[in-house]
Each structure stands twice: as C-alpha cells, then as structure tokens.
Image (cartoon, rainbow, N blue to C red):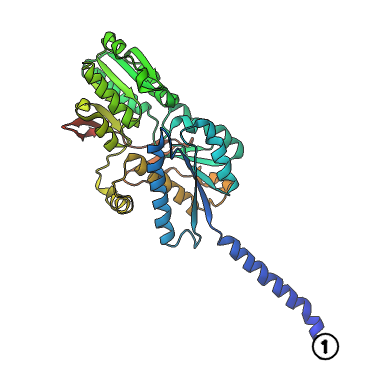
Amino acid sequence: MDSLKSQKNLPLFAIALIMAAFAMGTACVSRQPIVLGLAGSFSGRDSALGISGRNAAELFVRQLNQAGGLGHRMVVLQTRDFASDESKTVGADRELLDLGAVAIVGHFTSASAVAALDFANRERIVLVCPTASAASLGGKRDFLFRTIMSSVGDAIAIAADLAATGRKRLLVIEARENKPYAETYTQSLAKSVQLVDDIGFDALADIDYGRIARARADAILIIANPIDTGSIAQELRLHKVAEPLYLSGFATTNSADLLASGGEALEGAWFVHQMVESQPALGPLIESYRSVYGVAPDSAAIETWDAMCLVKIVLEAGGLDRRSFYERICKVRSFQGSADLISLDDFGDATRPLYIFQIRDGKIQFSGRTG
C-alpha cells in the first residue's frame, strides 16, 4: 500500500524538484552582472579625453557597486582602447558587443562617434556619447544618444561676440583629426562672419604663421585639443600675431593642460562651455574623484559622469539588454546630471546650459551664461 502511494506521489515530487531547479536557475541568471562597454582612445593623440572619461566611468561603477549594484546585480565595465585610430572603433565595439555589453559609453571625439555609428545602428546597440558634439551627429533617429549639446551653440555664441565687438574677419586654425567637429564651427560661422582663411593641420609644424599674419584677420579661432591649442597660441605670440583669440570647447576639456601649454599667450582668450567646473553641486564628485586620482575632474570626466547618470536611469527602468535599453532610453526626456538638468529630444540630442569664459591673469574666469 505504501509502495503504491509513493508511486502516485512521485510525479508531484519530480515536478516540485524541477520547479525548484528552474527557480534557482532563474535567480542565478538574474544575479549575473550587468555588462557595460566603454570605448575610447586611452592612448595616442586623443587620449586625454578618453583617460578622463574612463576614470569617471570606473569611479561611477565602483560607487554604484559599493552601494549594492542595481537590484543586487553588480555592474561590470568592460573597456576597449582604439588608440586614437578611428579605423579601430568598430573592432573595439564588436569586442564589447561579444562580451555582452547592453550599451556602450564613450567615443569621445566626434570623428570616432561618426566612425562607430553605422555599426551601432546595424547591431542595434546604443552608444551614449559624453563629449562628441558635431552637428552632423544630431537630428537623426538612430542608436546614438548624447549628453552633450551640439557645438553649433558655441559657434553662434562666438559669432554674437564678434558682432558685439565689431570684428568681422575671422581666421580659423583647425586640427584635421576631428573634421566633423571642426565643420560644426566653420559651417555655422560662415553664415554670419567672413572667414578669411581656414588653415587645417595634421601636425603643428604644418602651420604657416606667415600666411596667418598676411590674412589680417580681426580675430582667430583655434579648434584643437588643449595642448595643441596652447602651443599654437604661443607660436602666434612669437610671430607677433596679436589678434584676439577664440577657443573651441575641445581646447577646454582639460583646463590644466591648456593653461600649462599656452601660458601668457592665452591671456584674453574667449570661449564657451557647457559647464562651470566650480559649481557647488559638483563638490561631492570633485572630492571623490580627487581622493582616487589625486586631481580634480576635468570637463571630460564630468561630462562622462553625466553620461553614466543617464545610463543608470535607463538600467533602473529595466533596460537590462540591448533591446530594452534602447526602448527605455528613448523615453527619457530629462535627467539630473552632475550639476545641471539635461534634456533629451526625440533624436536623443541634449539641451543644456551654455556658459561664457575668458582667460585672465592665467586663470579661466566665468563671465556669464549665453542667451
């Protein structure tokens, strides 16, 4: 009798075991780490942006995991370096995709973001770009989302200051390595000022300062990285080219490098940027960043922190795989960054405040807000 009874209960017992095993398996899967990708130039000519961004992203993930992760799941940040070579961006992104990344943060220059975009659209993986601000990247329904505003606003602000000061003839010196970014300035400025010359360079030694002097411009705009911008300013001073200087946002991504390389030659230089590094709201980030890396975060690090804030919101909303990450990020219309509220439009393009600065007495001085 007991034997017959146990045989009848066996299927129920087996089902219970199967259900328990399934539940355990599901729990194990749900506790698997969330993989995020970070792609950028961490070596080579453009490495300053990438290294600062990587530092910020790693610190963000470390603090997130120390607080328990997301839903008791840890976040793993996988990084790939394409070494300032845009031809390697797709290979780096492919490796991150194969590692299970639900999204990729980075592509810190506009040129690298342009190079990665077709791959991202084809593979349907979101790119969150903290610092790529070329106008050509905006206004499209694709898999690129930016937490930085297009630099068209920078060009408009420069044109307004030129008009206010009675300057009409502008000469541009631009690094060819980041052409989409430079074109955002030149194409916009050409609508309202006279561009007397546009001098591109691959190496600093290529620049003809005699040609610059002969152009008799009212002002000069330098579009290059911080160290190159400072070096060009020094050369302009040595060649007694004394026209007022305007700088691109790229030049000010690392203010320490800019000031160290340019010195007194940068006195009076004017530029706009999308953040004020001395804002009180940045205090906790500055303190924690300095405690780990020994220096205050530059704007590239702060802007990457903003990008990670957006990523965290999307993950918390359930964007835990490539498809759901895209679906959730498309619904975000605004979020709190490290200091300012950042808005996103239907195309994933950001709107945020724009601030005016000038270099005086060897320091970057805040002058106000545009508009």
**Measuring 40% from the left and 52% from the top, which residue is drawn there?**
60
**Residue 138 seen by the camera:** no
Q: In the rendered view, does 350 fall on the left or right side of 270? A: right
* 36 relative to 176 in the view: left or right: right
Q: Which residue is at the far left?
A: 361
**Element at label 1:** helix
Expressed as whole percent of the image width and height from the top left, the position of residue 128 reads: 47, 41
Q: Is residue 82 above or below residue 22?
A: above
Q: Report the residue that reaches farthest toward the bottom.
A: 1
Q: Is residue 26 above or below residue 159?
A: below
Quadrant assignment, res 64 = bottom left
Q: Nearer the viewer, residue 190 or 58?
A: 58
Quarter-wise, where is residue 188 in the image? Answer: top left
Residue 79 placed where, x, y %? 49, 46
| Residue indicated by mark 1 | 3
Q: Quadrant of the C terminus?
A: top left
Identity, as a three-letter code, of the amino acid under mark 1:
Ser
Residue 32 position by quadrant: bottom right
Q: Position of residue 343 (x, y in %)?
A: 40, 40
